[in-house]
Structures are given as structure tokens and as C-alpha cells.
Image (spheres, helix red, strand yellow):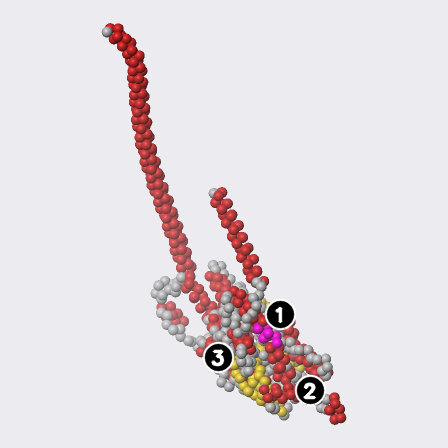
Amino acid sequence: MSTGLRYKSKLATPEDKQDVDKQYVGFATLPNQVHRKSVKKGFDFTLMVAGESGLGKSTLVHSLFLTDLYKERKLLSAEERISQTVEILKHTVDIEEKGVKLKLTIVDTPGFGDAVNNSECWKPVTDYVDQQFEQYFRDESGLNRKNIQDNRVHCCLYFISPFGHGLRPVDVGFMKALHEKVNIVPLIAKADCLVPGEIRKLKERIREEIDKFGIHVYQFPECDSDEDEDFKQQDRELKESAPFAVIGSNTVVEAKGQRVRGRLYPWGIVEVENQAHCDFVKLRNMLIRTHMHDLKDVTCDVHYENYRAQCIQQMTSKLTQDSRMESPIPILPLPTPDAETEKLIRMKDEELRRMQEMLQKMKLQMQDQ
Amino acid sequence: MAATDLERFSSAEPEPRSLSLGGHVGFDSLPDQLVSKSVTQGFSFNILCVGETGIGKSTLMNTLFNTTFETEEASHHEECVRLRPQTYDLQESNVQLKLTIVDAVGFGDQINKDESYRPIVDYIDAQFENYLQEELKIRRSLFDYHDTRIHVCLYFITPTGHSLKSLDLVTMKKLDSKVNIIPIIAKADTISKSELHKFKIKIMGELVSNGVQIYQFPTDDEAVAEINAVMNAHLPFAVVGSTEEVKVGNKLVRARQYPWGVVQVENENHCDFVKLREMLIRVNMEDLREQTHSRHYELYRRCKLEEMGFQDSDGDSQPFSLQETYEAKRKEFLSELQRKEEEMRQMFVNKVKETELELKEKERELHEKFEHLKRLHQEEKRKVEEKRRELEEETNAFNRRKAAVEALQSQALHATSQQPLRKDKDKKKS
């Protein structure tokens, strides 16, 4: 695995034995120690998949993690879905690879976009994300912080339908409701219905519309300038192919003498892991092999901190109005009346003045009569 | 033989006997005459395409009719569903076709799709209404009339691979009694063969269990019964549309070029496009028009006329005349109007009378009051007069007494002044 190699290459290998005792301090082994400790501790990752039914979400998750998380899944028929509400389902699995343990949680949103009336259908999702943040907030501010469970959603894969011309209103609504709370990675689902020219056009369209509607999707971080050219090239390609056009498959087929994951058609075989066929490999590399930790970091440092700041601000403004209420935070200073209250006061003043004027006018009228 | 047969025919009305001909008469050219007449007249065919934006409706139309209908790409952000009809004149051999393609723009895009079906139903009803109006006219020209009634609705199903969407079910239920629906699986190059088979079964199962009546290709005409029966089993057709040509072998065919293969539109192994074209255009186009006229339009007409209050006559009453009934209705309506007018007038008159009475009452009351007040006033005046008189009397009395007292006083004075005189006189006397 390339990442493993990278780390290993940075490990210290004391070259000169003579200078070892004089110059070599030894903290160059820190990466090793971090590696060891993290392996021992294990990792966790929460991934949310969202999008309309029938876009291949479960198939893609299966292809990504090569485990079947949806063994007994009940698919609703059309009439049952007419007034379907969105549920939140969590599946947690422990998987291990070369000694590294990963506790993977997939949050599924069945019923999203299925009903005839989908107004505010993303509300259960935003509520869930906020709930996880709140839970972590309370845990973090608690007294016993030894075993905090991090259930915050680290990444949301949003599936865009390839059958349209771009983003639909429900897509825009969902992404705008969640872009400040979770890292959104938009994907073009079922990309095997688009020829390469159409894929290019659709990606451009989606990128344009994301800019137009002001949606903040997950941005890949810039790579360091001291990385090698290969890596930089890869990184560039990655950025240029967002949003990824993916195809998923649960079945293994025989193609050119090899057994590959793919879909069998009368006119050919689509190979999921063939870079010329779709961006599945890019997605997998990005999500699992290179950027998983960055996704977690952005969630902790940006989204969670935003939530926390907002939460604290709300609580302080409440404290000024009511008496001391139950809060996990110790005593906070009283703030000055903020802009909000001042605006309110001014509005009320205006209203009073208007009412008085009206009264005057009415008095005059009565006098005339 | 002829004369007696005629008598028998005119007296009773038994089942006509079928006779065999002695030679070739020639009325077997009747269908040809009909055909040549209709060819000169030209045909009109109206297709309604309902499906999500971007699902491939325009491309399929282009592929079906092997031409390019100029349509602009629709946006996903329409406020509501609207219907966009476009009429084209096509010609093949010597047959003219006036083709109208109606697009349901914006279908399936809104967040709240509760009312998505309504503009479509309204449009279909409006076309029926126009035809009905033309039929009911006194001077009508049906042979010249451009028939805009929708003959077939192609419903495009999204290839999710699971089942119908809830919107599809709701919409098809609303449309199945108004138009011939042919469901189609669009963009079928995204479903593999095994998945497709399961998907088709699921869809048909859902349609049947929800009582949606889709168009069945007719199996009563022997010439086409067999092929239609076979095709009925392949519903819904999984189609792929393309206007681009790709070289396959040594021919240019309409196809879609993927990195992993080429999907040929006219290859029956790849998709059901050929079947759709066969069924829709080559075999059953006339049947679709007929079904629209005889079933869907008649149903609409019956409902509409029942609403207006017409009823079918029974067997033994006089033959039913639309005109008479219409006149009767009209008279009834007018008399109703007159009656209402009279009523209102009466009411008005009554009200006027009432108000008059009230006013009179009030006036009387006022008068009474006035009298009463006047009397009171007079009473007061009298009292005051009396008092004044009394006062005057008193004053007079007082004055008299005063005068008397004065007189007495002056007398007294005079007496005293005289007294000394008298005294003197008395003294003198004494």
C-alpha cells in the first residue's frame, strides 16, 4: 500500500553508526510511535450515504468496503412510498486489515426523496447530525472524558441522479441544509448510463450549479510542496474529476480472462475498478486511502467547532434573558446587549411611534366630525 | 326473388341473412376508397410524453421519427409542471402526418409533487372539451377540424431497478381513464438483462395491484393478434434513444458509444426500441386513435353531459334530440331566471312598504311627543302665569297694606297734630 510505504520512508534509519551517539537524539522515531499507538487504539469512521432510492447507494457501499451491510433489507413498493418519511438507520461493522482495526459506521437515509411531497425531507438528517454534535459536546464538557464515543458524521456521500441535466431542487435543498454541518462529497451515481462526453458535460454543469447556489462541498486539501511529482499529479487529477462518476457492483464477472467486479451487459462488461470506465477507484482512494483522516479532522476542527460556537452563543443569549439554566458549562460572563436585542428595541420603538401617530390622526378626524 | 325479399325486409326487422354472390361485384374496393380518402385528408397523431426532466423524452422522439425536433433543454428549476405542445408536419411516401408532441416540462422536479398530475389532466380534458364543443356546434366542420386529443401517453419510468416511484403510480392512476398509457423504461442501458427482467415483473405487478389500466395492444384483429399478444408480454418496453451514429462492422448505426462497448438502438438484443416503434407506429397507430375516440372521449363526453343535466332516453319514449333538450333546458333556465327576478322584485317592494310603515310610525311618535311636550309647556306656562298673578296679587295686597299703613301713619300723625289742637280746644272749653 502506498501510504504504508510513505510512512515507512520517513522513518529514521540511523546511517552513521559513529554519529549515532553524538548527533542522533531519537525523536525521529515519533512517527513510528504514533503509528504503533494508533494501530493499538483503532480507528473509527462514520459515513453517511444520502440520495433518492434506486441510485445504487447500497451497492456502492458494498463495493467500497467489500462487506455486505444490508443483508435483510426491505424495499418498499411504490404505493407504500407515497407518503414515506425519512428514517435514519445506522449499521456498524468492525473490519480489520493488516492489524489496523476500523470501526465503520454507515448511516443510511432510506426514504429520502421518495414521497410525492418531499418538503423539508432533509430535516431528519440535519436533526441527526446536530444530535451527534450535541452528544459529543456534552461528553466533551463532562467530568469523565475517558471513553468518549465519537459518533459524529465524518463524511456524507450525496448521490446525484445521472438521468437529469444537473442538480435538482431537492439536491440543492439537502446540500444547502447540510454543507455547514458535514463534509459533503457529491457523486454521480449509476454512471454507466452516460457516455464520456455526457459525463464531462454533466460534471461541468454540476460544478457550475454548486458554485451558483453557494454550496460548500468538501474541498481536497492542498498537498505540500515537498511531495513528489507523482503525488501532485494524482492530487490534481483528483480535484479535476470531482464530482466522481461512480458505478457499483456486487457481482464478480469474468472479463478478459480475469475475475473482476463489474456489470455484465449484452454489449460489454463494465469494470468497476477500471479507471477508464468510472471514477470508483479515485473515490475509494480518496475516501479510504488518503483522505479519511483529513475528513475526520475537518469535521472536528471546522464543523464541530462551528456548532460548538453557535451553541455557546445561543446559551449565553438565553442566560441573559432567563435565570441561570442548566448548562454543562461553568459560569460565563454576561455579555453586552448584542445587535439582535438592539434591533428589536428599535423596531418596537418604531411601532410605538406609528401607533401614536395613528391615534393622533384619529383624534383629529373625530374632532372634525 | 328480389321483390319478395324486399317485402319481407320492410315488414319486420329480423337478422339480415347473409347471401352469397354470383360473381364479382366490386365493393371490395371500399377499404381502398376509404384509404385513398384518408390519405388525401392526411392523418394527425398526438403524443404526450410524461417523465422526469432529462430522462430522454426528446431524444426518443427524435429516434422514433428519425428526425430532429428542435427542442431546448429544460431546466430542473421550474415552479410547476407545464405542457408544451409542438406540431410538426411529416411526410413519408405519399402519406402526410400532422404530428403533435406534447411535453410535460418540469415534471418530477419540484420538491412538493402533490399537484404535478393536475396540469396534465387539465390539458387532456381541455382537448376533449374543444372537440366536444366542435361536435355540439350548429355549423360544424369535423372533417376539417384539427384533432388535438391526445392519442397516446408515453410514460417514461426511471430505471432504478427496484420498482416504480410513488409519483409514477399516482400520476398513472389519474391518467389511465383519460388516455392510452404505454409505460416505457427509459435509459435502459443502465440495467443488465437479469435486473431488467425482475424490474419489468415488479412494475407490471405494481400496476396490476393498484388497478392502473395501461394500453393493451388489440388482439381481436387476426392479422396482428399474434404479434400484439407477444408484445403485450414485453411491456414495459426498455428503450435506448440516440441520434448519433457509430460505425459497427461496416455500417453506420444509431448507437451509444461507451468505453466498454456500443449499445445499438436497433439491436433487439440490446433494447426494445424496435418493438416500441413497431407497436406504436407501424401496427397500432390507427387503433390508438380509435380507442381515444371511442373509449376515452366518449367517457369524457358522457360525464360532461351528465353534469350538464342531460340524460339518455329509455327505450320506448321518443327518440332523443339534443336540440330539443337543449331548448327545453334553456326555457327552463330562463323561466327560472324570471321567477327569481319576480321574487326579488317582490322582496324589494315588501321592504319598501315595511320601511314606509316604520317611517310613518316614527313620524307619529314624533308628533305625539311634540304634542305632549307642547302640553307640558303650556301647563308650565299656565302655572307660571298663575304664580305671577298670585305674586301680583300679593304685591298689590302688600302695596295696599303699605298704602293703608301709610295712610294710617299719616292719619296718626295728623291726629296727633290735631290732638294738641283738640286738647287746646278741650282746654279752652274746660
Q: B251 above or below B133?
A: below
Tell me what residue is drawn at x 32 percent, y 32 percent.
B380
Which element type, helix, strand or loop, lies under badge 3?
Answer: loop
Residue topped by disc 2: A27
Tell me what residue is drawn at x 32 percent, y 37 percent.
B368
Name which residue type carries label 2. Answer: Phe
Query: Mark 1, residues whose alpha carbon is within 10 Å: few (<14), some, or many (≥20)?
Result: few
Residue topped by disc 1: A214
Tell me what residue is drawn at x 56 percent, y 88 percent.
A95
Q: CA distance from mark 1 to mark 2?
A: 45 Å
Name which residue type carries label 3. Answer: Leu
For residue B8, which quarter of the picture? bottom left
Residue topped by disc 3: A76
Q: Is residue B119 visible?
A: yes
Q: CA distance from mark 3 to mark 2?
A: 58 Å
Going from the N terminus, do you reach mark 1 or mark 2 first?
2
Q: Chain of mark 2?
A: A
Can you name the residue that lies furthest to the bottom here?
A17
Q: Position of residue A144 (x, y in %)?
A: 53, 80
Magenta-tinted stretch: A301-308
Q: Are marks 1 and 2 on the same chain?
A: yes
- Check residue B122 in the rendering and tell me which mark sits there, or answer none: none
Tell me what residue is drawn at x 58 percent, y 75 percent.
A304
In this view, the mark in front (1 or 3)? 1
